């Protein structure tokens, strides 16, 4: 039965259209696009203030952490694979106050973790580093850098970092070493 109240309610507050699922799908798509853009921005844009530019490397500094006197600075370069615009790396080279030098490479989510990150400098195999951790924007590999590798980075032309999306599909992403020696001198 349709009472006058029911007819009034139906006329004033009609049922929502049956497009809710498509609206939800559209909302989830927009959220996914926004998250992907944030991820790309987080991997591509170094956090901090650019203090100087040396060739293809930037010296980027952050304010000192609480209780510390000096800011934290690193050499930074962000690149995208030549043939895959959605795959990029951000490379950080940092020297800590105790003299330890660290190379940290951020790769996009979805990389295959077991093979780790490969490195070649001027077509010479340097080795592999395991991925240590994944955040909500990227996964990263980190190694302590010894003098021989620093010299290769200073004198080399191109470093190729190799990531894997599948066991068969390695992607080599070239990083220019132009300006690395100058940037390193500015960092120290």
Image (cartoon, grey):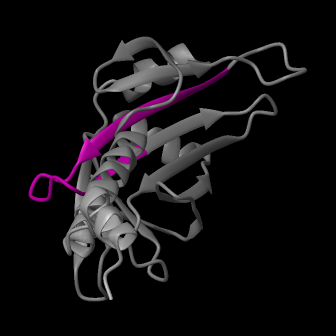
Q: Main secondary structure of the magenta part?
A: strand
Q: Nearer the viewer, residue 67 or 167?
A: 67
Q: Tell me if I can see residue 110 in this picture.
A: no
User: Looking at the figure, which quarter contains the C terminus?
Assistant: top right
Asked if 71 appears above or below 104 in the picture, the reply is: above
Rendered location of residue 151, percent (x, y): 47, 39
Magenta stretch holds residue 18: no
Q: Residue, x 42% and y 11% (percent of image)?
A: 52
Residue 111 percent location from the top left of the image: 38, 72
* Number of numbered labels in the structure image: 0
Query: What are the residue bounds of the magenta stretch?
Result: 72-90
Q: Could you say where residue 44 lies in the image, as x and y percent from the top left? A: 35, 40
User: Is 62 placed left or right of 138 in the picture?
Assistant: right
- Quarter residue 11 falls in: bottom left
For residue 21, side relative to residue 91 (left or right): left
* Quadrant of the rendered image containing residue 13: bottom left
User: Residue 26 location in percent, x, y?
Assistant: 22, 62
Relative depth, front residue between 96 and 80: 80
Q: Nearer the viewer, residue 154 or 109?
A: 109
């Amino acid at each position: 039965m349709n009472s006058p109240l029911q007819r009034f309610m139906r006329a004033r507050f009609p049922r929502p259209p049956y497009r809710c699922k498509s609206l939800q799908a559209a909302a989830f798509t927009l959220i996914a696009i926004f998250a992907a853009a944030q991820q790309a921005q987080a991997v591509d844009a170094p956090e901090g203030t650019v203090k100087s530019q040396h060739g293809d490397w930037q010296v980027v500094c952050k304010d000192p952490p609480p209780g510390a006197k000096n800011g934290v600075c690193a050499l930074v370069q962000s690149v995208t694979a030549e043939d895959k615009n959605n795959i990029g790396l951000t490379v950080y080279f940092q020297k800590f106050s105790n003299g330890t030098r660290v190379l940290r490479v951020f790769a996009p989510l979805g990389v295959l973790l077991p093979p780790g990150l490969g490195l070649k400098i001027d077509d010479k195999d340097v080795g592999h580093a395991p991925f240590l951790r994944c955040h909500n924007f990227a996964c990263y590999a980190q190694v302590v850098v010894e003098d021989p590798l620093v010299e290769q980075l200073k004198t080399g032309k191109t470093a190729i970092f190799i990531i894997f999306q599948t066991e068969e599909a390695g992607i080599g992403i070239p990083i220019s070493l132009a300006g690395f020696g100058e940037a390193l001198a500015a960092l120290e």
